[in-house]
Amino acid sequence: MLNRVYANPVDCDMLPRAERERYQETALARLLAECGGHPLVAERITGPLALHNITPGESEDHSGAICGIGPYANRPSRDPGACIVFSTSGSSGTERRLVTSYQEIINNARIHGKGYAACGVGSDHTLATFGEVGRFASEFAVIAALDMTGCTIVPLVDRLDITANVALFQELNVDALLAMPSELLGYLDHWETAPETVPALRLVVTGGEPLPAPVRARLQRLFGPELKVRGTFQTADAGTIGYQCTHCADGEFHLHEELQLVELLDESGQAAAEGEMVVTNLYRREMPVIRMKTGDRAAWTSHAERCDCGRTSRRIRLLGRAARLLKIGGEKTSARALGDLGARMVPNGELVQFVVSRDAGGGDVLTAHACAFADPDRARSARDTLLRDPCLGSLYARGRIVDLQVSGALPTHLTGSKQKPRAVVDIRDDASLKGHHT
């Protein structure tokens, strides 16, 4: 039953605001009528969603998972033969399972591909993508999405084999890249020391994590001011969410409003001009996404309703991770997970403070501070603990974290106003600590 359509696949990008809102309300009503039988859904139909005057339906019992609401449960797809089970990386490297269907993947890819096209990817590009096709949903969808743009796709078999891939770029005249910023660091190092191997890039599209200013500056130095750098925004659970057109400022994204209903909520759960992004996917049914907290902070832009590109879809400005979550090397982790790791490093209860920073090249550095690490033996043991951590150790081995360090003293300049050290401090983009800290 692969021809089933849950939501009318209209392009909301050009609709007037009133028409777009009517479309979203209709799609949301259909979603909740089919999936509202889950007992936890009712708890989510409050606050901003209540403004739509929609109540959960009395349909079949959906005891499976609803992302952001309930735990994963093994259950058969309601479309026999259409169920696909992917993995998605979770906090601290713990994998979760994602149930979807072929039709859901293709619909997400169709919309995600539209975002790539808006970023500038077209049939005149030969694009190398750093994501391998495998059991991760995002990696599978990328190839299908790029196919929508008509570009020539060059998937990298092993992105860590920099020398071989650089030669491949030259052989195939690759002029566009799709990668997470942390995946580019080794290539930038290579090209800066071997300028004769620099390809004739015209476009770089990033996703998965914010593009650090030092990495953008290195790209512009290598490839010139004419290089176009754009971004997309998505999560493995919710699917594609946003994209940058040629008129978007740094950190600003159009929303895919035919697929996602996006809310920004403050700490009390009320709609706000700035807050945590909460997403409802209007299409997904195999594992519904209803009011899922993304862990990302954002603000609505103050621009006019119609962008200079002609689109009327709403735009957001990403502000970073919410206090309980942060991304290191492109992977999510939580303050609680780092706290548990610190307790293993110093079991006597002494505070271990984790500081996330960038090196001069824009790479992520994680430093664990504790007075106990002044002892060289304990410092070595602590760093071994960091390297053995499933998430951090893997990111370090793959070059996504450029260094894992330990320090024998708490950095006093990072303490709070009451001289109580914070457990996690992120100073990557704001040395004055305006950014993430808990």
Image: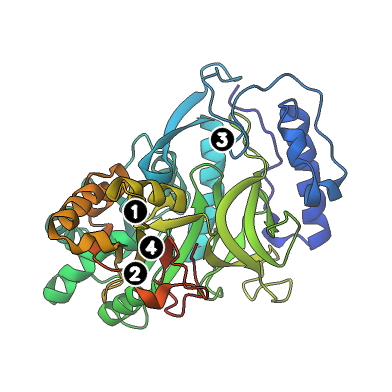
| Label 2 – label 1 distance at C-alpha | 36 Å
Q: Give residue 104's mark.
A: 3
| Left or right, 11 with reference to 424 | right
Ranked by sequence position, the earlier of labels 1 and 4 is 4
| Residue at which label 4 appears | 124
Ranked by sequence position, the earlier of labels 2 and 1 is 1
In this rendering, the label closer to the viewer, 3 or 1: 3
In this rendering, the label closer to the viewer, 2 or 1: 2
| Label 1 – label 4 distance at C-alpha | 8 Å
Q: Quadrant of residue 356?
A: bottom left
Q: Give residue 357's mark.
A: 2
> Amino acid type of disc 2?
Ser
Q: Quadrant of residue 14?
A: bottom right
| Residue at which label 1 appears | 152
Describe the element under mark 3 as helix, strand or loop: helix
- Depth check, front residue: 22 or 369: 369
Ranked by sequence position, the earlier of labels 2 and 4 is 4
Residue sitting at x 60%, y 64%: 298
Q: Position of residue 353 (x, y in %)?
A: 37, 61
| Left or right, 186 with reference to 104 | left
**Residue 342, above or below 274:** above
Is the C-beta separation of discs 3 and 4 under 8 Å? Answer: no
| Label 2 – label 4 distance at C-alpha | 38 Å
Describe the element under mark 1 as helix, strand or loop: strand
Q: Position of residue 363 (x, y in %)?
A: 29, 67
| Label 3 – label 4 distance at C-alpha | 28 Å
| Left or right, 208 with reference to 214 | right
**Does residue 259 appear anywhere in the picture?**
no
Describe the element under mark 4 as helix, strand or loop: loop
